[in-house]
Image (tube, helix red, strand yellow):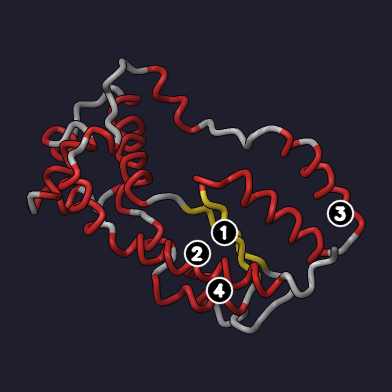
Amino acid sequence: MIRDLLLSEHILPSSKKLAFVIATRNPVKRWFSSFNWDLHDLVLSKGRAPTDGFRRFPKASDLAEGIAAGDSEALNFARTNHMGMGLSWYLPLDLVPRLSRHRFYEIRQEHADQDFARFIDDFSAFTGTATRLKISHWLRHRRLRAQLPRTKDQYKNAYLRGTFASPSDCDPHTLSKLREFLERDYAVNAALRQLAIRQQTDRVAWLPL
């Protein structure tokens, strides 16, 4: 896990051989996606009766409304399973500055193709070996001609339409309260974006033209 690596005494000094690639996503969209995945993975696909949480909050929009209302059961349930493992769970905000000691790449889901292409270009220049350059050349000219595949949501095809909720099913007030609930994830997202911009700017000075 990234937080364990960043806390390790063996890699605290700057290392030319170490690079972190971190995938990020809008926290509200990730939260809805994680609820839907938990509903599928823990309940529907197993043919099990819903647990208390899923019984009371059968859709992500129902749970979001409970969060907005300050319902204690909703607040506790929203911190369980995959739902409770947002970006700040994997990478607490106070550890983000440690990333500046290493090479760091951010791949935002909303800009995955662009960010992945930048990672390949930069990492191939960074490694410099003939073998890795050949790999990066293949990735740039073969895989990146098409968009990166998005496959995880395909499980939804097995269910009736309306089984899963999305942010568009909530009113603005509920979404605002959900963003407050996810404020730690938003803070880490913002810190990573600032670090990524700063590192990209620093690399311009040495990247080969």
**Mark 3 or 1, nearer chain start:** 1
Q: Mark 2 against mark 1, which lies toward the viewer?
A: 2
Q: Mark 4 against mark 1, which lies toward the viewer?
A: 1
- Residue 100 drawn above or below residue 73: below
Label 2 is placed on what type of residue? Arg
Going by the image, does 8 lie left or right of 177?
right
- Mark 4 packing: few (<14 Cα in 10 Å), some, or many (20+)? some
SS category of the residue bearing label 4: helix
> Label 2, label 1: how many angstroms apart (C-alpha)?
8 Å
**Mark 3 or 4, nearer chain start:** 4
Image quadrant where residue 94 sits? bottom left
Measured as percent of width and height from the top left, residue 24 is found at 48, 53
> Label 2, label 4: how many angstroms apart (C-alpha)?
12 Å
Per the image, the residue denoted by label 4 is 99
- Residue 55 drawn above or below residue 131: above
- Mark 2 packing: few (<14 Cα in 10 Å), some, or many (20+)? some
Measured as percent of width and height from the top left, residue 147 is found at 64, 35
> Label 3, label 1: how many angstroms apart (C-alpha)?
21 Å
Label 4 is placed on what type of residue? Leu
- Residue 63 drawn above or below residue 128: above
Residue located at (50% from left, 64% from top)? 193
> Label 4, label 1: how many angstroms apart (C-alpha)?
11 Å
Q: Which mark is residue 193?
A: 2
Q: Nearer the viewer, residue 202 or 116?
A: 202
**Mark 4 or 1, nearer chain start:** 4
**Mark 3 or 2, nearer chain start:** 3
SS category of the residue bearing label 1: strand
Q: Which mark is residue 133?
A: 3
Per the image, the residue denoted by label 1 is 106
